[in-house]
Image: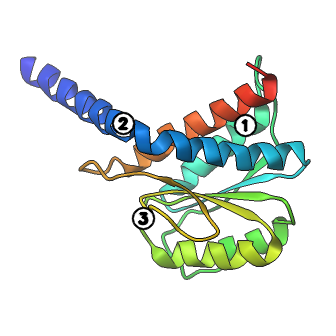
Amino acid sequence: MNDVYGYIAREYHKRIDCITNQVDLLAPAIEAACDVLLNCVVGDHKIVLCGIAGDAELARYFAISQRTGGVSNTALPCLAVVQDTDETKSSQWQTDLKALCRDGDVVCLLDSSGDSNLVSSAIELCIPRNVSLILLSDRQELTHVTCIPLMECGGSMLREQILQAGHCLFTLLQRRLIGD
């Protein structure tokens, strides 16, 4: 029993340490991304969450949770554009973004894969359409993109960090909309 307890305790502490070490880096990035989303929502535009393969479920989760609002939250105009396979060369997600995104919208790209082609394709789709791009990834800085830079802390924690940063981002957005 002690081995199980020790293992669980180590895993939790590893994640707590990872998040704690990133707060100084993430706080200004999340605030900047929140400003982009706030302008989008106030301007009556939509938020499109995009994820491929394993990140698809996170995109769906955020879109559904923000669209449904809740007791103390505002329902936001969110939808998910996802591709369940890891074939980033496939153009289905690109076709969907082209069809759905308009001037003033925001695309939030969740990327735990580190695929530079994915990010480049999203930038090429967004910039000509005057669509803002928020990237939750291990990328630090990109031109024309609001980055929430996540650091790999060992293992496969990047997706967990996307979940945590996304939760903070949308909670901050809700607080600003409600005035809390």
Q: Position of residue 155 (x, y in %)?
A: 25, 50
Question: Label 1 is placed on what type of residue?
Answer: Gln
For mark 3, give the secondary structure: loop
User: Residue at label 3?
Assistant: 113
User: Residue at label 1?
Assistant: 66
| Quadrant of the snapshot with the C terminus | top right
**Quadrant in the picture for residue 66:** top right
Quick check: marks 1 and 3 in contact, CB under 8 Å? no
Residue at 36% across, 36% down:
19
Could you say which disc has been placed on residue 19 in the image?
Answer: 2
Label 2 crowd (10 A; few <14 / some 14-19 / many >=20): some
Q: Earlier in the sequence, mark 1 or mark 2?
A: 2
Residue 142 sits above or below residue 40 on the image: below
Q: Position of residue 173 (x, y in %)?
A: 70, 35
Residue at 72% across, 50% down:
36
Quick check: marks 1 and 2 in contact, CB under 8 Å? no
Q: Position of residue 40 (x, y in %)?
A: 82, 50
Relative depth, front residue between 156 and 116: 116
Q: How is the image coloured?
A: rainbow
Residue 121 visible:
yes
For mark 2, give the secondary structure: helix
Question: Label 2 is placed on what type of residue?
Answer: Ile
Q: Earlier in the sequence, mark 3 or mark 2?
A: 2
Label 1 crowd (10 A; few <14 / some 14-19 / many >=20): many
**Quadrant in the picture for residue 34:** top right
Question: Label 3 is placed on what type of residue?
Answer: Ser
The Cα–Cα distance between marks 3 and 2, rounded to whole angstroms, is 19 Å
